[in-house]
Amino acid sequence: MQPVSWSSEKYYLRQILPLVRKHKVIRFSRTDSRLANNGLPLRLQKLRCHVNYNALRFTPSIEALGNKMISSLRKTGSFVVLHLRYEMDMLAFSGCTHGCSGQETAELTRMRYAYPWWKEKEIDSEKKRLEGLCPLTPGETTLVLKALGFPRDTRIYIASGEIYGGEKRLAALKAEFPNIVRKEMLLFEDELHLFQKHSTQMAALDYLVSVASDVFIPSNDGNMAKVVEGHRRFMGFHRTIQLDRKKLVELIDLFEDQELS
């Protein structure tokens, strides 16, 4: 069943709890935003945290592989996770095409129009970017990491799907921070094979590494970034750097126009 969106505790106590008692197990086909975020008693907010970050677990196979990656990264000391949201579908549906060629922009637009369920078709990419509503590009992220003072030898794990534009789009980042790591570099091909056809399971591996990192930096404030940040707070307020993209884009443009050192 689908719970009613933005429901209060009364809905769950009066309508859902009797169903749980009757059927023992209920599968919610949708769970995002089905419980009100605000106005809930503190005891329920605390319970929400324990459900999200303690009771819910990944399958043993995902947890085992995630722990192996974390152990491998820990052998060389501390590490930063950069959650780089720059996959093709994300750019197509958000309409964020800054830094893309004309050919790439056309390809991303075609993809957006090919999906009838995606209602927003005409998108002003530059307007969205200036409002801080687009993810930073890998090149922009490189500038920000340098400005924040991360040393050149920082070990950076890239949490993402396939980066749109491939290796050439990561060239600037790798040139400035050569100690870049991805899951494909930490695991054998046969270990990853079972997961590669399932993007959510690959994301689960990134999630586990992100939660365990010394510093977590998302380039966009999507669902995964928010849940990872919440999990890190739950574990003891581990460091997460939230980027003010609206301000940063303004500074980056000044820098690229040579109006800022």
Image (tube, rainbow, N blue to C red):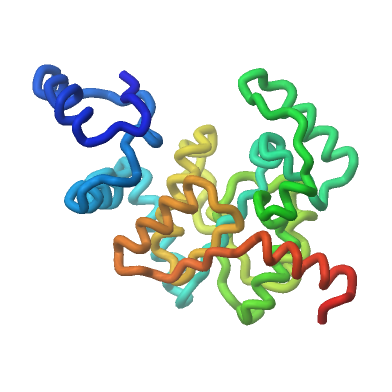
Quarter of the image for residue 117 reads top right
Q: Nearer the viewer, residue 108 or 39?
A: 39
Q: Nearer the viewer, residue 43 or 184?
A: 43
As displayed, is residue 154 above or below residue 169?
below
Viewer-proximal residue, 191 or 201?
201
Residue pictured at 23% horizontal, 51% vertical: 50
In the visual, does 258 lie left or right of 115? right
153 in relation to 131, above or below: below
Residue 242 in picture, x, y percent from top left: 53, 64
Snapshot quadrant of residue 77: bottom left
Q: Is residue 33 left or right of residue 181?
A: left
Residue 166 image position (x, y, % from top left)? 74, 49
Quadrant position of the N terminus in the picture: top left
Whether residue 243 appears in this view of the structure is yes
Foreground of the two, 26 or 60: 26
Horizontal side of 179 relative to 211 (left or right) equals right
The answer to whether residue 33 is above or below residue 157 is above
